[in-house]
Image: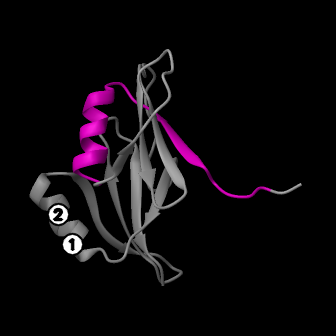
Amino acid sequence: MKICELNHVALHVADVEKSCEFYRNVLLLEPMPRPAFSFPGAWFRLGVNQELHLIGERGDPVSSGNRSNHFALRVDELDSWEQYFRKVGADFNPRKHRPDGAWQVFVRDPDGHAVELFTPP
């Protein structure tokens, strides 16, 4: 028995349309078809084989941050992302250097979920 790969990350969101706008227009993720579930949501492509699943109707508070619940996306470089985040008014923390040599930027979605963008060492 073995785990083969991470397939998707699921986030519970309050407003699916507002979250879709963030993931489509701020993180520039590609929307993808979603099965006709009985609850609101949306799916986005994360790289080649992984997906982001948004699940609507969140009522509970979100606890997320760089030292708590978050997910990370490897990017090719961070300069353009930081400039872009400033341009669109995204809620993000400036670049930090990790002890392993990687660089990271954290951005928050409309619900407060933290998403890390990083470049490896």
Query: Which label number is shown at residue 98?
Result: none
Q: Nearer the viewer, residue 76 or 79?
A: 76
Coordinates of residue 37 in the picture (x, y in percent): 51, 20
Residue extending furthest left? 87
Query: Which label number is shown at residue 84?
Result: 2
> Which residue occupies 32% across, 48% down?
108
Few, some or many residues within 10 Å of mark 1 (<14, 14–19, 20+): few
Q: Could you tell me the amino acid type at mark 1?
A: Ser
Q: Which residues are magenta?
A: 3-27
- Residue 63 in view in this figure: no
> Which residue occupies 52% across, 47% down?
69
Horizontal relation, residue 106 to residue 3: left or right: left
Element assignment for label 1: helix
> Which residue occupies 50% across, 61% down?
48
Total marks drawn?
2
Quarter of the image that includes the N terminus: bottom right
Q: Nearer the viewer, residue 115 or 2?
A: 2
- How much space separates mark 1 and mark 2, taking CA atoms? 6 Å
The answer to whether residue 1 is magenta is: no
Query: Which label number is shown at residue 80?
Result: 1
Q: Could you tell me the amino acid type at mark 2?
A: Tyr
Residue extending furthest right? 1
